[in-house]
Amino acid sequence: MPVSHTSLPADARLVILTGAGISAESGLKTFRDSNGLWENHRVEDVATPEAFARDPRLVWRFYNARREQLWRDAEHSVEPNAGHRALVRLAETLGPDRCFLVTQNVDDLHERAGHSDVCHMHGELIKVRCTECQQVTDTTETLMADDSAPLPTCQRCPGILRPHIVWFGEIPFEMELIARRLSHCTHFIAIGTSGVVYPAAGFLAQANRMGATTLGFSLDPPENVGLFDHFIQGPASQTLPEWVDAVLSRSH
Ligand code: OAD
């Protein structure tokens, strides 16, 4: 692996953006690869506020299937992979001021690998939000177990619960925090994302404008591959540990 992008200066400040690709080898489907989530479901049916207003049961079935897979799939349990764990090693070495992880993913694999302070800009499968009082709670319970079960309701008011997930047409979470960290990063690293969904897809151009060094890790070249200073192709469970080990062996 060329030294050019494996040595970090002592004052390096990293912003790392992950997408569905980092969880693919843990057994979770990505969105746009073959047989991906958007091949078997229409975004308009399961990932917009209008879809939830029109058919909340269909939307809950889509998210419950992903919730159950994360926590209760007995056959092939879903665990973090070596890519998630490599990022934990990097974050623990650099510390929170020098390593900021923002993920588009709604799974909890970064946390289960041991990563703290994960910024979930698209929300989290473990969280539900009341559509009336807006209370957000964590639950891994099976919600609406079958079609005859009632829609899940809030414990504090009669409101219907929705997934605490950002749908198309909604504003992602923590955008000010993300902008602040991007505005003074020295390195921007995008991992396992196709670079087609904004505003996340715009972080790379922002980092380039800042003069940051930009690295992309993906199985297939993303749409914006030409904008990276360095692109490392391959499965994240292999490319990330290799890169992190090289960086840490040279870190000050
Ligand atoms: P995509 O499915 O669009 O892209 C997955 C990316 O991961 C592709 O670039 C693949 O080449 C790469 N990939 C697949 N397997 C990999 C592996 N083993 N190692 C490394 N890379 C791998 O997923 P995202 O870019 O995350 O948002 O999608 C972005 C957003 O679109 C999601 O957060 C979701 C979706 O609609 C909302 O729903 C709001």
Image (spheres, rainbow, N blue to C red):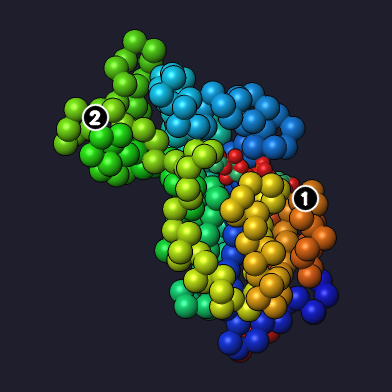
Callout 1 touching callout 2 (CB < 8 Å)? no
Q: Amino acid at mark 2?
A: Gly
* Secondary element at image label 1: loop
Q: Which residue is mark 2?
A: 159
Name the quarter where the C terminus is drawn. Answer: bottom right
Whether the residue carrying mark 2 lies under 8 Å from ligand 1 is answered with no
- Does 217 sit above or below residue 97? above
Given residues 179 and 40, the one toward you in this image is 179
* Residue 32 shown left or right of residue 112 in the figure: right
Q: Amino acid at mark 1?
A: Glu
The extreme left residue here reads 156
* Residue 70 shown left or right of residue 152 in the figure: right
Q: Is residue 114 visible?
A: no
Dot 1: few (<14), some (14–19), or many (≥20) neighbours within 10 Å? few
Tell me which label, 1 or 2, sits earlier in the chain. 2
Q: Is residue 182 visible?
A: yes
x and y percentages locating residue 81 in the rendered image: 59, 52
| Among the 4 quarters of the image, the one containing residue 153 | top left
Q: Which residue is mark 1?
A: 223
x and y percentages locating residue 182 in the rendered image: 56, 70
* Residue 197 shown left or right of residue 131 in the figure: right
Residue shown at 46%/64% (left/top)? Answer: 176
Taking the image in four quarters, ligand 1 sits in the one at top right
Mark 1 to mark 2 CA distance (whole Å): 41 Å
